């Protein structure tokens, strides 16, 4: 059975016109999406600074830097980044030619003091042994001088000779007595100096502990600990230990802001898709240079003030050393509106 289709019947749709209308609708939707998307971008980009203050931050905690006052080379490391250690755990072992040189200098000084004390003891004993003989000779010369003074027949040259002998005897006795007394004083001072150097040497050996490095506190090993074979100058950190019981965020407050942050003001810490509430605990009276993760070579680093943000006790904080962003809304209405939009679109 053949059916004749009347193209001019208004109840029969034209397939060409149908395709044109569908294509035109898609084009209008895409165009409207692009236009409103660009408008939304400019509104958010230029309007956001008028609604909230946003700046980068770093999740941190009190840290303890482990270093030595010597140039050292790492022999072994028993920990890696992120490892949990307890107070007294051995971090690693080092060797230090500088520390060996310090110990050898102390030992050389102790040897010199021992030799000097031996020389003084020999001189003191020799002076003490000959002192009695010198005193006896002095008494003999004084007796001779006394007899000459009583006699009237001694010549002038003889009198001068006896007087010279008495003077030499007095000088010898005084010299030996002074030598004995000074030797005793020097021996006492050398013994005191030896004890001080011995204490310094014991302190150096105790602090160096044969090159073993121990954790002073319990915590988590930070990033970039020293590796085996690395040489470090005096004062360079071998490892850093972070205290996981006291975590906070150091927020680098932007210099361009409408309202200055205040202590006890509520903020939001953005970490990935998480929006973690926090409170400004203190605003540090110092500025720091924020370098950022990987900034461009042509962009200068900005010095900004730091605010320290604390989390609630029941909040799971982000990972230590993580980079976050902090939002501080200028008004409570904007904060409630943002929270409603987050809940509506499930952005938490």
Image (cartoon, rainbow, N blue to C red):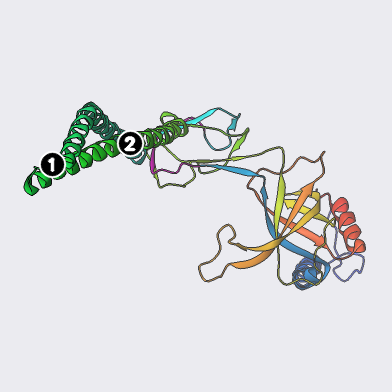
Q: Residue placed farthest to the front in the image?
A: 152
Question: Was residue 68 drawn as part of the magenta stretch in this picture?
Answer: yes
On the rendered structure, is 319 left or right of 9?
left
Q: Which residues are magenta?
A: 67-79
Mark sitting on residue 291: none
Mark sitting on residue 162: 1
Classify mark 1: residues with Cα within 10 Å, few (<14), some (14-19) or many (20+). Answer: some
Question: Was residue 61 drawn as part of the magenta stretch in this picture?
Answer: no
Comparing 276 with 279, the one in front is: 279
On the rendered structure, is 4 left or right of 189?
right
Q: Hey, which quadrant is residue 287 in on the image?
A: bottom right
Question: x, y (%) of residue 136?
Answer: 21, 29
Question: x, y (%) of residue 148?
Answer: 15, 40
- Residue at 43 percent across and 39 percent down: it is 227
On the rendered structure, is 184 left or right of 276?
left
Q: Secondary structure at mark 2?
A: helix
Q: Secondary structure at mark 1?
A: helix
Identify whether 101 is placed above or below 337.
above
Name the front one of labels 1 and 2: 1
On the rendered structure, is 134 left or right of 337?
left
Question: x, y (%) of residue 270?
Answer: 74, 53
Of callouts 1 and 2, the N-terminal one: 1
Residue that badge 2 annotates? 181
Comparing 187 with 256, the one in front is: 187
Contact between labelled residues 2 and 1, with CB atoms less than 8 Å apart: no
Comparing 205 with 37, the one in front is: 205
Residue 84 visible (yes or no)? yes
- Residue at 19 percent across and 28 percent down: it is 133
Classify mark 2: residues with Cα within 10 Å, few (<14), some (14-19) or many (20+). Answer: some
Residue 272 visible (yes or no)? no
């Amino acid at each position: 059975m053949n059916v004749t289709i009347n193209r001019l019947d208004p109840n029969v749709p034209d397939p060409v016109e149908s395709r044109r209308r569908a294509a035109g609708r898609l084009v209008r939707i895409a165009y409207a999406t692009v236009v409103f998307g660009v408008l939304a971008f400019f509104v958010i980009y230029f309007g956001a600074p008028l609604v909230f203050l946003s700046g980068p931050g770093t999740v941190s905690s009190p840290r303890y830097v482990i270093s030595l006052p010597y140039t050292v080379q790492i022999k072994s490391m028993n920990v890696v980044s992120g490892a949990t250690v307890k107070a007294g755990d051995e971090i690693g072992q080092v060797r230090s030619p500088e520390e060996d040189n310090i110990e050898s200098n102390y030992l050389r000084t102790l040897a010199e003091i021992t030799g000097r004390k031996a020389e003084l003891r020999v001189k003191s004993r020799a002076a003490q042994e000959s002192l009695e003989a010198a005193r006896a000779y002095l008494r003999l010369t004084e007796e001779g001088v006394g007899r000459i003074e009583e006699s009237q027949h001694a010549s002038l040259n003889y009198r001068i000779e006896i007087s010279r002998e008495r003077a030499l005897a007095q000088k010898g006795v005084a010299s030996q007595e002074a030598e004995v007394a000074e030797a005793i004083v020097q021996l006492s001072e050398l013994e005191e100096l030896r004890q001080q150097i011995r204490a310094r040497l014991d302190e150096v050996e105790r602090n160096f502990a044969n090159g073993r490095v121990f954790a002073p506190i319990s915590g988590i090993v930070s990033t970039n600990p020293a590796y085996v074979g690395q040489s470090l100058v005096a004062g360079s950190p071998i490892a850093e230990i972070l205290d996981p019981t006291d975590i906070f965020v150091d927020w680098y407050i932007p210099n361009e802001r409408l309202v200055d942050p205040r202590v006890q003001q509520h903020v939001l810490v953005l970490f990935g898709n998480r929006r973690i509430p926090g409170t400004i605990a203190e605003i540090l009276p110092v500025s720091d240079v924020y370098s950022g993760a990987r900034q461009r070579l042509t962009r200068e680093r900005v010095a900004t003030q730091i605010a320290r943000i604390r989390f609630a006790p029941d909040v799971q904080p982000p990972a230590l050393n993580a980079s976050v962003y902090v939002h501080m809304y200028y008004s409570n209405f904007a904060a409630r509106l943002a929270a409603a939009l987050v809940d509506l679109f499930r952005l938490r």
